[in-house]
Amino acid sequence: MKIVIAPQGFKGSLTALQIARAIEAGVKRVMPDSETVLVPAADGGDGTLQALVDSSGGTIESATVSDPLGRPVEAAWGAMGDGETAVIEMAGASGLALLALDELDPLNTTTYGTGELFTAALNAGYRRFIVGIGGSATNDAGAGLAQALGIGLVDAHGNELERGGAALADIAHVDMTNFDERLRGVEVTVACDVNNPLCGDDGASAVFGPQKGATPETVKELDAALSRFADVVEGDLDVSVRERPGAGAAGGLGAGLMAFLDARLAAGVDIVLDAVGLDDALEGADLVITGEGQIDHSTIFNKTPVGVAERAGKHGIPVIAIAGGLGAGYRETHEKGINAAFTLVSGPMSLDEAMADTADLLSGVAEEIMRTVDIGQSINS
């Protein structure tokens, strides 16, 4: 029996690879001769870097870069095992988690540090990039990233703009003279699960600005600045980003990556599952086991278990999910290809207790699942 084990990491507990190994241990107690294929997965959010590195036999690298307010911070990036692809999570350099509540300042926060991560990967010889852009603290349309890569953003007097979203109100020209030539022809794929345009009522500032500290007045100021940015980019680079789906992601970083690096935006789960080779792993499989920390109504919106299930369904392979918890609406995942879902919690316990014992709990529930599968095989034989 061939079993593909393709879970997402449990946030704050174990990585996807650790989860997969724990499930494998339970499977082998019942079916020691089964073929198990471990495919650590993610959906473009937390854990994506680790999953891609683990699945490819790569390494986690680090660089000292600028945080959203320009302070030095140590940020990780991933070198995949193919020797060609780097994984960058912008949240590590330009994310909300790096700031205290009283430091939130979308007028001045910058993606400069994310650009510095690109430079670190370029210096290491990488020319293909997978970028996760969730959790940003910024609203600068990737202007800081552009500045870190040698792109000049200047005002009407030829002066370089200050960093941050507010400064884009004065942008008059994009100067590509000092653009890092190593970036010409690179392949950049962006994990993006929102379709918001750059500007307007559904744009970056209006929808995501408030969670980054923007007041109603600030939202208007930032939206006008992004609109100005879109006009100048279209005029100087002949690239229209204002209405493109996903342009408003991560405070407009989606727009900046498309404008400056010709990036392709796609659903995070699809990018990851392609990169980890799930489709190849599914060939000849009899069962798939997936999972995430919480399975509930939100899981149906292209989260890892559903992404895995949809691909398994194309091969007619049944899918079982294991979760730390089953929340409201978890049964809706059955309509998305998850045949059965189980929680790893075996009895009354606190969250801290469950997180401390996750590996053993996973192995235990995986063992019971496989005992049930074994019964089914015996009945049908």
Image (tube, helix red, strand yellow):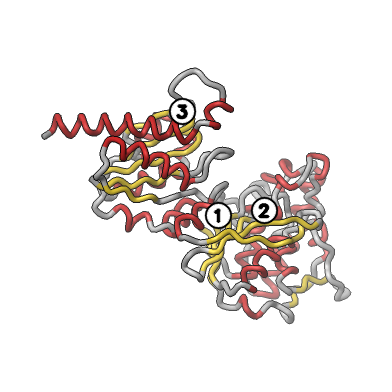
Question: Where, quadrant-wise, is the C terminus in this rendering?
Answer: top left
Frontmost residue, 295 versus 78: 78
Q: Residue at x 53, y 69 (%)?
A: 128
Mark 3 vs mark 1: give the one in front. 1
Q: 369 left or right of 149?
A: left
Residue 303 drawn at (x, y percent): 47, 43
**Label 2 neighbour load within 10 Å: few <14, some 14-19, many 20+:** many
Frontmost residue, 260 versus 45: 45
Please tell me whether residue 143 is drawn above or below residue 363 in the rendered image: below
Kindly identify which residue carries mark 3.
Answer: 326
Kindly identify which residue carries mark 2.
Answer: 92
Choose top left, top right, bottom left or bottom right for residue 259: bottom right
**Label 3 neighbour load within 10 Å: few <14, some 14-19, many 20+:** many
Amino acid type indicated by mark 2 = Gly
Q: Is residue 297 visible?
A: no
State the CA–CA distance, disc 3 to disc 1.
25 Å
Frontmost residue, 90 versus 210: 90
Q: Residue at x 51, y 45 (%)?
A: 15
**Label 1 neighbour load within 10 Å: few <14, some 14-19, many 20+:** many
Residue 350 drawn at (x, y percent): 56, 22
Q: 95 left or right of 153?
A: left
Q: Earlier in the sequence, mark 3 or mark 2?
A: 2
Q: 56 left or right of 199?
A: left
Choose top left, top right, bottom left or bottom right for residue 275: bottom left
Q: Given contact means CB atoms under 8 Å apart, are the residues at marks 2 and 1 in contact?
A: yes
